[in-house]
Amino acid sequence: MAKGKPTQAEPACRLYLVTPPALEPAAFAPLLAEALDAGDVACVQLRLKDCPEDDIRRACDVLRPIAQERDVAFILNDHPRLAREAGCDGVHVGQTDTPYRDARKILGNDAIVGVTCHDSRHLAMIAGEEGADYVAFGAFFPTTTKTAEYKAEPELLSWWSELMEVPCVAIGGITAENCAPLVTAGADFLAVVNAVWGHPQGPGAGVRALNAAIGAALAGSAG
Ligand SMILES: Cc1ncc(COP(=O)(O)OP(=O)(O)O)c(N)n1
Ligand SMILES: Cc1ncsc1CCOP(=O)(O)O
Ligand SMILES: [Mg+2]
């Protein structure tokens, strides 16, 4: 994920992989490599919830090079200081995490800082004005990965992408089967957990299916 909007050489909507909420780094490493070698992925977010910082640091040490060696940005969820110390490309913060401005101070201007904005135009405008590299909206569909308290609609993505330059990420229950309305509404990135790591044929098949669905949706909306 380069900072700013995708360049012309990149598809208008790209995959943003979020790791499962718990993982064993050595066992997960080949699955991550399989996913990233299966097709276009803009970034990987390491999202380990309720996990000691030392374990997160160890997971960064194992997983970060797998992403960065492939020119895929490696973003840490929730922990700006740890993200800086562990050489991550950026951090994702939610509305009850470290505030955006503090995260930016910790990581500096070159890092990617993304902000959860749920279903809120207001939160997104604030994050965009403050300098966030992307705003994340969701959940668009039912999800078992996280208890989602907010429900976003595709119109939010079209409103945002018509008005704003700051890229938007769609998250929550997204699959190859249901993603087309989000792509045509203008999502710059689709963030997924279960559709890739829970794919019955493995994460590579999950990435291929999602990229095929994104490509089909973009082709269908081009004419
Ligand atoms: C890309 C992306 N969007 C939203 C979230 C959710 O962040 P948050 O609301 O802070 O919840 P947790 O993920 O920390 O449980 C995200 N992580 N990534
Ligand atoms: C982290 C997060 N934030 C809102 S929904 C969600 C989980 C998305 O996971 P899945 O793609 O499996 O629904
Ligand atoms: Mg958070």
Image (cartoon, grey):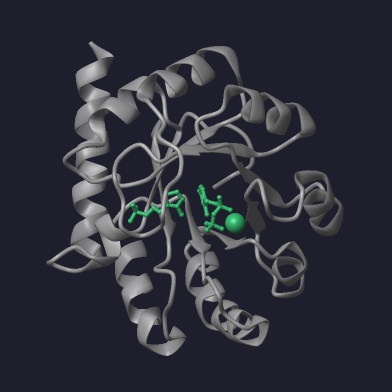
Query: Is 11 above or below relative to 91?
Result: above
Residue 165 x/y as whole percent: 61, 22
Residue 87 occupies which quadrant of the picture?
A: bottom right
Residue 57 occupies which quadrant of the picture?
A: bottom right
Q: Is residue 205 visible?
A: yes
Query: Is 99 above or below relative to 78?
Result: above
Residue 47 x/y as whole percent: 51, 66
Instruction: Residue at 21%, 37% (x, y): give it.
Output: 178
Residue 60 x/y as whole percent: 58, 77
Residue 136 x/y as whole percent: 53, 39
Spot the residue most to the right.
105
Instruction: Residue at 26%, 44% (x, y): give it.
Output: 211
Instruction: Residue at 55%, 72% (x, y): give it.
Output: 64
Instruction: Residue at 51%, 13% (x, y): give it.
Output: 162
Residue 171 occupies which quadrant of the picture?
A: top left
Q: Is residue 38 visible?
A: no
Count all numbered tags in the image, as a single digit: 0
Using the image as rendered, state which of residue 53 and residue 33 is in the foreground: 53
Using the image as rendered, state which of residue 107 and residue 52 is in the foreground: 52
Using the image as rendered, state which of residue 215 and residue 196 is in the foreground: 196
The quarter of the picture where the C terminus appears is top left
